[in-house]
Structure formats: C-alpha cells, structure tokens
Image (cartoon, coloured by chain):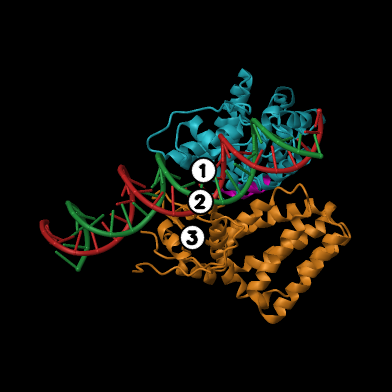
Chain colours: A cyan, B orange, C green, D red
Amino acid sequence: MDKKSPIKITLTERDESVTITQWVYQTLRYAVMNGQILPGRALTIRELASILDVSPMPVREALRQLAAENALEIQGNRRVMVPRMTAMKFTELCEARIAIESHAAARALPYIDATILDELRQLDRLIDEAQALGDLEQVSILNQNFHRALYTANPHQVTLPLIESLWLQLGPFMRLATSKLEEHYLIDRHNEAMHAIERKDALALQMAITADIREGIAFAATPELLHSFIEQSAGVSA
Amino acid sequence: MDKKSPIKITLTERDESVTITQWVYQTLRYAVMNGQILPGRALTIRELASILDVSPMPVREALRQLAAENALEIQGNRRVMVPRMTAMKFTELCEARIAIESHAAARALPYIDATILDELRQLDRLIDEAQALGDLEQVSILNQNFHRALYTANPHQVTLPLIESLWLQLGPFMRLATSKLEEHYLIDRHNEAMHAIERKDALALQMAITADIREGIAFAATPELLHSFIEQSAGVSA
DNA sequence: AAACTCAAAATGTGATCACAAACTTTAACT
DNA sequence: AGTTAAAGTTTGTGATCACATTTTGAGTTT
C-alpha cells in the first residue's frame, strides 16, 4: 500500500475550540519544523487527510497556507513537498535570519521593560536546565521562545511573521545542526544579549543576537552535513 | 443591496492556462496592493465570488493565501479585511524594508553581470519616461520591477517573498505617498545604485537602496497622511 | 430615546461529488 | 532488452450542499 516511505507525524489532541483547519495547520507545521517529513517527498491531500483522519478540505487549506509561508513548495506539477536544501540556500537563510532578527531586536529594545527582561531571564534559565538535561528539542523550542519574546516587545512589530517563515524553512534541517550543539554551544549569548538590554546598547544587542544565530546554526553548513541534506531527500531529481 | 460601500476592483481577462484560484489570487492581490479595497471593510467569500463570477471555493483559497502573506488579516470573528494602518506600523514597515532590502541588495551584488546591469539600466530609463509622463502608477510598478530584478540576481535568493509581503502591506497606503512623489523624487537613487554596482561597492549600494526607499515612502508617515489612513478606513473600531 | 431581546438572514467551515490533468502500470513493438 | 503507447489509477481543482456560528434588524421594554 505504501509505495513511498510512510509519513509519521506527531498527532496531538484536537481542541474543540479550534477549527479543524487550524489543527491540521499546526500539526503539519510542527511536522515540517521538526523534519518529520522528508524533503522532496510528495505530500498528497488525500494521504494526509487519511493520516489525520479528516476530510480533504482542511488539509487543502493548511497546505496552501504553509506553502504561502514558504514552509512547503508547490511545483509546476501541483505537487506539494518540503523544499530541498542546498548549502548556498542554507547560508542565505542564515544570513537573512541575522539581518532581520538583529534589526527586530534593535527595534524592540526601546520597549523592553523590567517585566519583559524578567521573562527573558526566566527563559534563559529554562534553556540552561534543558541543556543540562540534554533535551535538545526542548532547547530548540525554548530558544525560539526567547527570540520571540524579545522581538514581540515591540508592540508595532511587523517582522515576526517573516522571521517565523525563515525558522520554518530552516527547521527541517536544524535537527542535523542541534545534534552537534552540545559541543559548540559554549558561550551563553543570551546573557550577552540581556546585558546589552540592561545597558540599552542596541549595537551590542545586535552583535549578541548575530553571534547566537551564527553559532547556533551556521556551522551546520559543512560539507558532511550538506551530504546529509541530499542523502535524506527523497526521490533525487530525475 | 449594498449595505457597505461597494467593492470596485480591476478585472483582467482570465488566461485558460491558469487555475481559477490563481487568477482570483492575482486579481485580489492587485486590488489590495493598489488600495482598491478599504482597510477595515469586511471581505466575504460569497460577495467576492459574486463580483468575480466564480464559485466560493477559489475565493476561499485565495483569501487564505493572502492572509498568510499578511496582505489580509483574519480577525477572531473569522472576518477578513485589509489591515488598518497606523503611523508607527507604517514606520516599522518602512524600516523593515530598508533592513531586508539593503541586505538582499548586498547579497545579490556578487551575482550581477553585464546582462542584469543592462536590464536594470533599461528599467531605470523606463521609470524616467513614465515619470516624465506623470504616470505614477506605472512608475510604482516599474520601481518594483527594478528592485525585484536587483534582488533576484542572487540565484539562492530567499528574501524576495518576505520583501513582497512588506510591499503588499505598504501597498494600500502607498497611493497616498506617491501623490507627493513628483515634488520629492528629485535625486535618482537608482543611478547611484547602478554606479555602486559597477564599482562592486556593497556599502554604497546599500546606502543607495536605503535612500531610495526612505525618500520614496518615509515622508508619507506625516500627521496629515496618517489622518488620511484613519479617514479612509471603513467602520471605525466598535 | 437608548438598550435589550429574539428571530431572520448571512457567513465561514467542512464534507462530498464530478472532472480533467498527471502519474503509474502494463502491453506491444522495434 | 529498451523504448514507446495506451489503459488504468491517482490526484488537484472546482462546485455544491449542510450546518453551526455570527451578524443584522425589527420589535419591545425601560
């Protein structure tokens, strides 16, 4: 029955207050973000509908939304898949993250008060704990929360959706990076960021964010990891 | 029959080779980008389907896609509308454009060859012609083409979708800005950009792009234009 | 006159169906 | 055997329908 490799995605309980489309969207988004779907693997509406036990309609809408966010790619064939990655594209995504997130951080700085700073401190503590326990998936999630909390301090924030789009595109390939994270994540750039915030030093904050991003993912763009990218892609280009 | 202000959008001939959903998407996108739909005006699927003479289905998909691109906003009520604008948000969108587009320009610079430079020169000439004729809408379109041609020189480009999202969000309110464009657009920043490209001077290119964006739209965030933003919004907050 | 109530109309969501385009498999032929 | 051709299957697109929720508007009350 399964001609292609079977799709195994994390299913969560569906909250009644949320529409089916939203639930499907969140489920698929999580699956894409965590690399549960092989790049290049064709995603069909009916197959996903069957897996998620819903009608094709909510899947259609969720797929289109994810495609609009660049998390999925619609080919000319109208086939939907997780985009394949290349070393150059990975680098571009990284550099785009640095450019946009350091900008967002500087723009948020004037709005950061004691409450938000406390929130950041607590998130940093939680990250340290997760790191000590070796729970890399939790580290990744908390790290995102840290960045999100920082940027959303700006009440007129407009860049977060763009940043989340970049996270989504990098997500499937971050798993490879975080496996090496333990040995590389030596310096706590979050502490540097918070010190910069206390001093209201925009430039220092941008440098801390830049370093955090670069150290977190940039080293993943090495030849051996690029090989993994190609390796794990389903159905190499004909 | 029309309880609210009627929606008047530009209809183009539908190409048979394109899906109805894509045609609806392009039509609505153009309408949003050119401020043909009042911010805050509720957009209903059936009303648009009636106007465009299609079934509700393609409209549903197009609306969801535009919402994912931040061109439309879905409220908790599940009502869809063009987001309202504020002076602060306008400024943030502007600054985001500068940060991302100057980054994209610098990233594209190494890939610009004689062919692309010629293309840019020709677009600049066309802009001058349209400016001389006073065709501000054409100037706006060609200006976008200029920027797009520059950024897409980078074959590993990942920021263009993000940039287009910002254009879409600013679009509805650019009409107000371009009405003043004639008197303000004194210096040809495109020429500065092309000189920087010839010299492969990334910093000069970034400065030219920054100036081009800032002079093109930043002056729109003045009190009197902000007033127009509120003025033209339909159905003030209840 | 302003606020509340409740029925009628409208709307988004989700399911099902029909159809054409794309893909897959099988068969025939060089 | 390798290539081509056609039949069969799968898939995305679009239309239509049912239903629960929301919005609207008239009628009533304070």
For disc 1, the marked residue is A60
Foreground: disc 3 or disc 1:
1
Count of number-bearing discs: 3
Residue B169 against residue A150 in the figure, above or below: below
Residue A45 against residue B9 in the figure, above or below: above
Residues beneath discs 3 and 1 located on the same chain: no
- Direction from residue A148 to residue A94 in the image, left or right: right
Residue drawn 58% across the image and 61% down it: B170
Residue B121 against residue B164 in the figure, above or below: below
Of residues B126 and A5, the one nearer the viewer is: A5
The magenta-colored residue range is: A102-112
Tell me the quarter of the picture where residue B145 sits.
Answer: bottom right
Quadrant in which the C terminus of chain B appears: bottom left
Tell me the quarter of the picture where residue C23 sits.
Answer: top right
Viewer can see residue A152:
no
Q: CA distance from mark 2 to mark 3?
A: 22 Å
Q: Position of residue B116 (x, y in %)?
A: 82, 60
Residue A16 numbered tag: none
Of residues A36 and B24, the one nearer the viewer is: B24
**What kind of residue is marked 2?**
Glu
Does dot 1 land on a helix, a strand or a loop?
A: helix
Residue B61 numbered tag: 2
For disc 3, the marked residue is B84
Of residues A3 and B25, the one nearer the viewer is: A3
Of residues B232 and B8, the one nearer the viewer is: B8
Q: Alpha-carbon neighbours of circle 1 within 10 Å: few (<14), some, or many (≥20)?
A: some
Quadrant in which the N terminus of chain B appears: bottom left
Q: Alpha-carbon neighbours of circle 3 within 10 Å: few (<14), some, or many (≥20)?
A: many
Q: Are marks 2 and 3 in contact (CB under 8 Å)?
A: no
Q: Position of residue A208 (x, y in %)?
A: 70, 38
Q: Alpha-carbon neighbours of circle 2 within 10 Å: few (<14), some, or many (≥20)?
A: many
